Structure formats: structure tokens, C-alpha cells
Image (cartoon, rainbow, N blue to C red):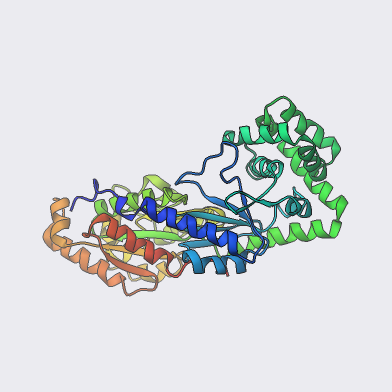
Amino acid sequence: MNHTSEPLSALDPAPEQRAAFTERLHQWGRETRFRLCFLRYRVADVSHTSSSDWDLVVPEPVPAAAELQTRIGAPLVTVPRHFVTQHFHREGQIDFLPRLEWHGWEYLEAGRFWSQVRSGADGLPRPALAHDAWIAWMTGLLWGARFNPKYRNLILQAWGEAPSEMEACARWAFGCETAGPLLATLARGEPGEAVALVSKLRRSLGLQSLRRSPLKALAGWWNHWRGEARLHRSPPYPWIAFLGSDPALVAIIHRKLAEYLEARRFHLISTGWRPFLFGKTDSTSAGRPPLHPAALAFDWWVGWLKYLHARAIHSMVLSEGGYPDLLADPERHGYSASSPRLEMILRFFPPLDRVIILDTDPAKVTERNPSVSPEEARARTKAYRRLADRESHFLLDAEQPVEVVVDQIIKRIFSPSPTTP
């Protein structure tokens, strides 16, 4: 089967499915007992497309999410952080913001925000225009040190219609001295120029928070970093390795899965067989002298630590190949099949969250790789099938249609949904 040209459209939610998902979310938003507010949703000229996410301010994110799941189903994965809980569904991403902050320091007073929330014509609770624009502006500046041009008109409209409210937000968050230059960018009609003020904004936000309430500011800062430390101890984004007797087929399935996940707003890091020294460029070690197994373990541990921060906050890691290959096909990587130390050393390698073994007919391996003899193909296939008995290793029939293979991989990756304890 030619997987290269096969589309993944069969896995995409049909427009009517996404519409039904959206309506269930809306219905929950109108009926729930939990306080919530939709941000930047169908306001000004900010469009909401099939690739957009939903951002909601929800002070009680955990019980609210449990209630929402009874309406729309469980997400593929949930990533809980101190300032946001991200829910990735097949139909789209929903983010719950329990507070409006940066590193535990609020940039918009909660009481002021909630006192001006009103239901729109569609019955969904929405913030004041000035607050909606302020949140969009500050989210980019404080968290990303960047400005998103798609919110420019929203921000300038809010400045034109409610300048006193924008001024009040700026002075409360940063103090009068820093608020002046920030507001001057609005007066010039260039909110993007505020990127140059990011360092000063962050310092002023922390100082202003400490002046208002030292204990609350310190507690917010501590809770933020304690939550980040938990994510680094147990990253919510998994490391997935793809193995198989046919490297060409492994590469194709790896690429197709990456396309599917990226279309659903997942951030991905793709690595090769040796993640630190060769990264994306190396899916095998063909043509190179093999590393001593201890040096290979060092390579993997450095790679694992290198990507730990990314896995804690935003990225899955997909490896085209992995060190378990050595248990099934050591010769392909230059190692001796009879090495008595190899399996023992592999026990000291960093853990992989999921190992997907792509099974295929040995005859197809030979057909796609003429240099591989039928006997070698049968031996490789049998060896990889034996790996399926190990914990977190899953054997999948890779000769099925590509959308079936990718769907089965998704189920193995996200069932049960990996979350931070």
C-alpha cells in the first residue's frame, strides 16, 4: 500500500461535527453554574476559524472541565498549568484561564474584570471590550515578548471607545511611570511598539504586585513555579518512538502523524535515532562507526534532558527510530547481536512514554527494499514483533490505510490521556 500519497482527511472532523461540538460548548457556557467568560470570540474583526482555539476565563478550571466533558467528551490530552489548563480535542483546543497573570502576578484586577462581564446576544458571557483587548495585548507581550498583528484593530478600537478603562488597567498593573510609555504606543496607533517595553513591563508588574499585597504576590509567584516544577518532574507531553523492520515505512507514518498533530495545534519536535548528537538528521547510524553503548546512553540522556523543558510546557517529541531498535536489529546500527552487555545497558537509558512498532509483511519489506533478502526481512519482522511484549510498546499493522494507522497510534498515545498528577 502506498502510504505516501494517502490523505488524512478521513480523520478530520466533518464541518457538521465541529459545528455540533461548538454548539455543545456554547450550550454549556449558557447553562453552567460555573463562572466563566469567552475571550476574543467573534469580537471586532477577530475571526474564529476551524484552526482557532477557544479561550475562556474560568476561576474553577478542574470541576468546570469535568462538567464540560459530560457534554463534549474527554480531550485527547489535558495540560494543567498554574495560569492555564489546555484541553486538546479532535475538534479543537479549549483553554481555561483561572486567572489573568504572568508568573503569578495579575495584570488585570479580577474584581474589575468580572464586574463588567455581560452576556452577548448569543447568551455567552463576554468581557468588556477594553478588557478583551487588554488581555490579548498583555498575553502576547508578557508571555511571548511579541505582538500579534491580528489583534491590532481590536486593541485600537478599545482605545478609541474606552481609553479611560485602558488607562486604568495599565496604571493598576504597572504603575503610572511605566503605564505612560505603554499608553503612548496606543496614542500613536502602534501597539506593536510596546514589544520594546517588555522587560520594563515585567519588572514593573512584579514590583506593583508586591506593593499592593506582598504576601499575595509572593504566594502567586511560588505557586506558579511550583506548578512548573511539577510539570518538569512529570512532563504532560509524551516522547514517542516509532520502530519497525521497514525504515522507509516508519518514516512515512512518522511524517503523516506529525502532519495530523500539527493541524490540531500540537507543537512537535522530531528527532532521529540518536536525539542529541544528530537530532533530526539521523534516523539510523548507517555509514557511521557505532558508539560504545555507554556513550549511546549518554547521547540519549542528554537528548532527554535537552527536550525536558519543551515536553513540560508545549511539545511532544517524535523519534524516527529509537534505542529499542538495538534489541530487534542491532546489526543495522553496527552493533553485535551477541553482545551480552547490550540489553543490560539499555535498562539504564531514559524512559520512552510510548514505543510504536509498525508491523508489516516481510514480503512487502523486501519489495520496498530490494537490498533486504527475504530471510533477513522475516528475521527482522519476527524480532520487532517480540518487542511488543514490553511495557508501553504497541504493535500496529502498518499495512492498513494510513488514516487507520494514524488513528490507532492516536489511541495508543492518548489512552489513558497523559496528565500531570
Q: Residue at x 73, y 39 (%)?
A: 199
Q: Is residue 387 left or right of residue 308?
A: left
> From the viewer's perspective, is residue 208 above or below residue 418?
above
Q: Residue at x 46, y 46 (%)?
A: 51
Q: Residue 360's spot in the image, x, y percent?
A: 21, 61
> From the viewer's perspective, is residue 93 above or below residue 170?
below
Q: Residue 348's spot in the image, x, y percent?
A: 46, 68
Q: Residue 308's spot in the image, x, y percent?
A: 54, 56
> From the viewer's perspective, is residue 6 above or below residue 411?
above
| Quarter of the image where one finds residue 26 | bottom right
Q: How many marks?
A: 0
Q: Residue at x 42, y 48 (%)?
A: 262
Q: Residue furthest right?
A: 211
Q: Tell which of 245 and 251 is nearer to you.
A: 251
Q: Tell which of 399 and 43 is nearer to you.
A: 43
Task: Look at the image and tell me whether residue 358 can be seen.
Answer: yes
> From the viewer's perspective, is residue 107 above or below residue 220?
above
| Quarter of the image where one finds residue 104 | bottom right
Quarter in which the C terminus is drawn: bottom right
| Quarter of the image where one finds residue 407 | bottom left
Q: Is residue 81 left or right of residue 273?
A: right
Q: Residue at x 29, y 54 (%)?
A: 250
Q: Residue 257's spot in the image, x, y percent?
A: 35, 53
Q: Residue furthest top?
A: 188
Q: Residue furthest front?
A: 121
